[in-house]
């Protein structure tokens, strides 16, 4: 029996569109009728997750719960969140529904272990995601060695995410920050870059760089396709 997908989106809107697009692109389909039914609630008013975790910002859970209820009412069979930091709130959100949430960090870590066995991954993410240990725990479970950005590299990443991609600025505005992060971590021994913020695949794509990356949005899309009972298109 085929299942449907619910996307709890808006965190941010471009990342939501990126996940939707990747589900379409990676579904093995030859015509419209071969695709998955997808419900999207794109609520950009959900309070910032990093601010809530680190600086006393508004709790995003009520707004996330409202989106969850709308997706339940639509008939979604599972829930996806195209925001890594939002997964920090999953222990509070999952008990509110019988629908399963598919985990972006878990999907990414499993793919990293299979595709880059023995390689060291650099975790590129928001300060909130890093502080939560989401990716550290997921990678340790899959026995994938990893590196974290230092303080200056982390500040540069936050500028790329918030003052660059989320602000809709062109890649020229953040390419120096992104280069400093990538080059610095490569010098420390990073073999691949795990793009643990949904804005970062957009940044790398906009820059046109060919980097050894693991895109959690892509891996979440593939996990959702399989969950829904469809096949992933072979590349």
Image: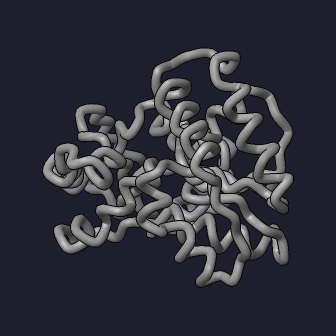
Picture coordinates of residue 105 (x, y %)?
Answer: 53, 65
Q: Is residue 32 visible?
A: no
Of the pair 37 and 179, the residue shown nearer to us: 179
Picture coordinates of residue 102 (x, y %)?
Answer: 44, 66
Of the pair 202 and 144, the residue shown nearer to us: 144
Above or below 179: residue 119: below
**Coloration of the structure image:** one colour
Q: In the displayed structure, does residue 62 sit left or right of residue 158?
A: left
How many numbered marks appear?
0
Q: Residue at x 41, y 54 (%)?
A: 128
Q: Residue at x 46, y 66 (%)?
A: 103
Q: In the displayed structure, does residue 13 sit left or right of residue 28?
A: left
Q: In the displayed structure, does residue 82 sit left or right of residue 90?
A: right
Of the pair 203 and 95, the residue shown nearer to us: 203
Q: Tell me the quarter of the picture where residue 115 sits.
A: bottom right
Q: Quadrant of the N terminus?
A: bottom left
Q: In the displayed structure, does residue 149 sit left or right of residue 235?
A: left
Q: Is residue 178 visible?
A: yes
Of the pair 121 and 93, the residue shown nearer to us: 121
Above or below 151: residue 17: above
Q: Residue at x 56, y 71 (%)?
A: 136
Q: Residue at x 26, y 55 (%)?
A: 75
Picture coordinates of residue 215 (x, y %)?
Answer: 66, 52
């Amino acid at each position: 029996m085929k299942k449907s997908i619910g996307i709890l989106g808006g965190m941010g809107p471009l990342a939501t569109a990126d996940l939707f697009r990747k589900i379409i692109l990676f579904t093995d389909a030859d015509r419209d009728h071969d695709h998955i039914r997808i419900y999207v609630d794109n609520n950009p008013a959900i309070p910032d997750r990093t601010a809530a975790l680190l600086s006393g910002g508004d709790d995003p859970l009520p707004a996330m719960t409202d989106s969850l209820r709308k997706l339940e009412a639509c008939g979604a069979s599972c829930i996806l969140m195209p925001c890594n930091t939002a997964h920090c709130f999953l222990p509070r959100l999952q008990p509110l529904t019988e629908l399963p949430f598919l985990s972006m960090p878990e999907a990414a870590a499993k793919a990293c272990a299979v595709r880059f066995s023995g390689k060291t991954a650099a975790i590129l993410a928001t300060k909130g995601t890093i502080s939560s240990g989401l990716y550290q725990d997921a990678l340790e479970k899959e026995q994938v060695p990893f590196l974290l950005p230092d303080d200056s590299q982390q500040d540069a990443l936050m500028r790329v995410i918030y003052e660059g991609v989320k602000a809709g600025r062109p890649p020229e505005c953040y390419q120096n920050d992104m280069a400093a992060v990538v080059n610095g971590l490569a010098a420390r021994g990073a073999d691949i870059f795990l793009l643990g913020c949904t804005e970062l695949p957009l940044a790398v794509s906009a820059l046109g760089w060919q980097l050894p990356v693991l895109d959690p949005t892509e891996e979440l899309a593939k996990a959702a396709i399989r969950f829904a009972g469809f096949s992933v298109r072979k590349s």
